[in-house]
């Protein structure tokens, strides 16, 4: 079996596109590949006390479009170019994998700014890049949804190139860079952006620059961002769920809560509860189905199917203690769905569900550092138990 293939983030794609467009403007050649610095970055001082970015590595990024645009000054010099990189998510199933990330670069010799002035490179969001409308994100309201690390990555890539080529081609003038994403608005509908208050397109993300397949770091970052937005939006309670179905059922149960209060924590049980518990929400709610509840009741911090098996022997023991006739059969169960079917037809099954939900609530409280309201749902939508 081949190892999963890594890819690169939308931030790396944007930096690569901007670097390719600048290369065309400065050198007059359209590069087929560019080398992009990767975050995280450090700023150690040199012997003179000056700081210069030190990157964690580099990535060679293919360029699929690079062209000069017909905009000239009286002397015939072309000041604008455009380039595009297709985001390659590797084997990660990200919705933005394959999206065309385009950067338009305009040189502005009349504008007063010099390296390393932060105004030397101005970043803007074009069509398909979302705009922030709610507080709580690392970007101010009204700004394009280009996160701080990709912004830094683009500025470092472009400023390094400008400094490197200055002796041969002369000082590079200040520039503005506009990032756009083909079909970005349509892609954003398949993300959590609308709930986070990001409208009009996708976000330009990437704290590492590269994409690891099925990245846990990306999921945790999404959960953390959702919690920040919920808090900044004034949500008194936050409702964590293990997926879309359980979230939809929580929405029905708590219809007065704002959309920002609902966050999909997936299998990151301990992480999401701990993060929510550290924030000043008045209430924390957890919604799930029986399989995830059993794993939480066993104290599992991460509940993916490949990372831990349900102890049906422990469940059978609880059934015996509660007088459930199905205890012997439950010990032999292979799935939580089968065990739940048996409990729902047993006279003592309701008591067992109550006890297992309370046990899960104890573990949830340990992870969160305070009480958590639990909601156990049946796949058909019924609320089976709450604690």
Image (cartoon, grey):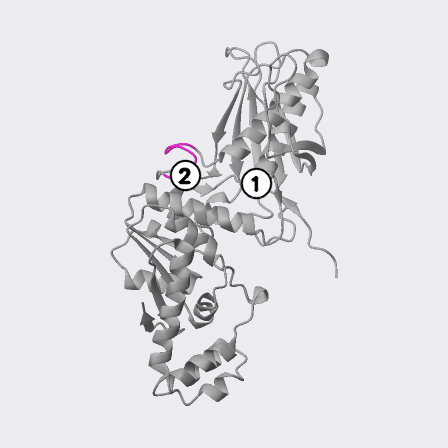
Q: Which residue is mark 1?
A: 10
Residue 356 placement: quadrant: bottom left
- Helix, strand or loop at disc 1? helix
Q: Residue at left 56%, top 16%?
A: 116
Location of residue 323 with respect to 150 vertically, above or below:
below
- Report the front residue among 158 and 102: 158
Q: Main secondary structure of the magenta part?
A: loop
Residue 327, image x and y in percent?
45, 86
Residue 282, image x and y in percent?
28, 51
- Residue 142 in magenta? yes
Residue 62, image x and y in percent?
69, 38
Residue 49, image x and y in percent?
60, 14
Location of residue 55 with respect to 25 vertically, above or below:
below
- Between the C-alphas of marks 2 and 1, the distance is 18 Å
Q: Which residues are magenta?
A: 136-143
Q: Can residue 25 be seen at all in this image of the molecule?
A: no
- Report the front residue among 208 and 311: 311
Q: Residue at left 34%, top 66%?
A: 375
- Quadrant containing the C terminus is bottom left
Location of residue 318 with respect to 247 vertically, above or below:
below
Q: Which mark is residue 137?
A: 2
Side of 178 relative to 357 (left or right)? right
- Helix, strand or loop at disc 2? loop
Kindly report which numbered mark, 2 or 1, lies closer to the viewer in this rendering.
2
- Report the front residue among 295 and 119: 295
Residue, far bottom: 325
- Residue 8 in magenta? no
Residue, far right: 1
Residue 379 placement: quadrant: bottom left
N-term mark: 2 or 1? 1
Q: Can residue 35 be seen at all in this image of the molecule?
A: yes
- Quadrant containing the N terminus is bottom right
């Amino acid at each position: 079996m081949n190892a999963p293939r890594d890819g690169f983030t939308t931030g790396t794609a944007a930096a690569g596109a901007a670097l390719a467009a600048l290369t065309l403007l400065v050198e007059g050649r359209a590069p087929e590949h560019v080398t992009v610095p990767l975050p995280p970055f450090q700023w150690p001082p040199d012997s003179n006390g000056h700081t210069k970015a030190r990157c964690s590595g580099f990535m060679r990024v293919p360029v699929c479009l690079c062209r000069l645009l017909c905009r000239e000054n009286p002397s015939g010099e072309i000041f604008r170019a455009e380039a595009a990189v297709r985001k390659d998510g590797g084997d990660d199933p990200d919705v933005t994998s394959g999206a065309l990330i385009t950067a338009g670069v305009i040189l502005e010799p009349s504008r007063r700014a010099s390296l390393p002035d932060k105004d030397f490179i101005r970043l803007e969001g074009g069509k398909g890049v979302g705009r922030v409308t709610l507080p709580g994100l690392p970007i101010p309201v009204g700004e394009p949804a280009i996160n701080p690390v990709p912004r830094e990555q683009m500025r470092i890539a472009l400023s390094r190139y400008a400094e490197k080529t200055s002796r041969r081609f002369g000082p590079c003038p200040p520039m503005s860079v506009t990032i756009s994403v083909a079909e970005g608005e349509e892609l954003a509908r398949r993300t959590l952006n609308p709930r986070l208050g990001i409208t009009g397109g996708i976000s330009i993300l990437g704290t590492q620059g590269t994409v690891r397949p099925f990245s846990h770091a990306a999921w945790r970052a999404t959960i953390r961002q959702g919690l920040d937005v919920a808090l900044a939006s004034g949500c008194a309670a936050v409702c964590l769920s293990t997926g879309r179905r359980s979230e939809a059922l929580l929405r029905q149960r708590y219809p007065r809560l704002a959309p920002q209060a609902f966050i999909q924590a997936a299998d990151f049980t301990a992480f999401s509860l701990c993060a929510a518990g550290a924030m000043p929400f008045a209430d924390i709610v957890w919604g799930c189905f029986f399989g995830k509840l059993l794993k939480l009741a066993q104290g599992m911090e991460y509940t993916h199917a490949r990372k831990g098996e349900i102890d049906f022997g422990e469940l059978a023991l609880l059934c015996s203690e509660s007088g459930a006739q199905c205890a012997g059969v439950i010990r032999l169960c292979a799935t939580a769905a089968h065990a739940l079917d048996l409990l729902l037809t047993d006279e003592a099954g309701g008591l067992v569900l109550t006890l297992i939900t309370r046990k899960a609530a104890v573990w949830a409280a340990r992870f969160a550092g305070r009480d958590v309201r639990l909601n156990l749902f049946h796949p058909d939508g019924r609320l089976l138990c709450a604690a």
